[in-house]
Amino acid sequence: MKEEETVFTPADFVRYVAEKKKIPLDAIRVPERLIITYQSKKYDHAKELIDGKPVDWWVYGENQPFCVGKFNDVEIGLCCIWIGAPAAAMTLEELIACGARKIFEVGLSGGLQTFLEPGDIIVVTEAIRDEGTSYHYLPPDVKVESSVRLRNRLIKHLTEMKIRHFVGPVWSTDGVYRETRSKFRKFKSAGVLGVNMETSAIFSVAKYRNVEAASAQVISDILMETGWLPAFDRQVVRERSKTILEQVLWVLSES
């Protein structure tokens, strides 16, 4: 079945921005290598590492900041996207239209497995689609996986650096307060490591647009049969978030 044409495209939005800012269309570009995150502290740390500078044409301002810098002499873009699959997919679409081709998501996940602890790092292999956005891109039976090349480079790097990490799938949902016990049991028994809101949408957009995307997550809270253990403010979560950002930067700069 032929795909139906959309009313407007990410490229149309980029042209609109160029007209609004009164700049040439080719001035609106982002580096091929891109990190996306959802927490301002992660963004601030990575911005420091790449000596990131905001770009004049960025229309979202400090509410959803974007900057460009260098790491290991390689140009890298960095964006702090609003949480949730729809916002993440929309902004990623625009960044891809501006030139992003190798994308690493660095986020937070709730741990599902008893062996996981706050601060543990997950390198994502696949994202279970339990949100609505991805179904606008791909049929329901299509699996969405990370770039094998990017994730294997990160796994190799973490292993060589002797940094504790786990490799496996996550569950992405847009119903944070509908993470029912039956779903928890189902995904836990299937070996799913964590739950978040965006990864399956990120992978779906990347697959649809034929670009590479990978994801690294830090366990920020724990789901259990008896309830929920929040750990967002623990020092180990903050420190491991910095650690994984640094490792992802090395991987992207060498990719």
Image (cartoon, rainbow, N blue to C red):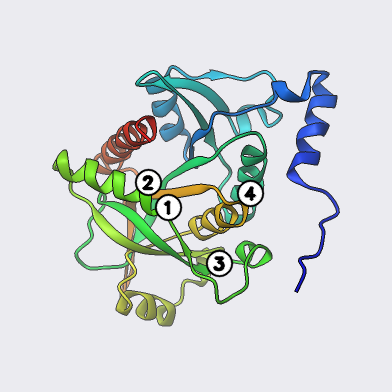
Q: Amino acid at mark 1?
A: Ser
Picture quadrant of residue 100: top right
- Residue that carries the numbered disc 4 in the rendered image: 87
Q: Nearer the viewer, residue 165 or 142?
A: 142
Q: Amino acid at mark 4?
A: Ala
- Residue that carries the numbered disc 2 in the rendered image: 150
- Residue that carries the numbered disc 3 in the rendered image: 175
Q: Amino acid at mark 2?
A: Leu
Tell me the residue at 77%/69% (across/down).
Answer: 2
Percent from the top left, x then y, of residue 147? 42, 52
Q: Earlier in the sequence, mark 2 or mark 4?
A: 4
**Element under disc 2:** helix
Percent from the top left, x then y, of residue 131? 57, 66
Tell me the residue at 61%/63% (across/down).
Answer: 134
Q: Is residue 196 left or right of residue 175?
A: left
Task: Nearest to the eye among marks 1 and 4: give it.
Answer: 1
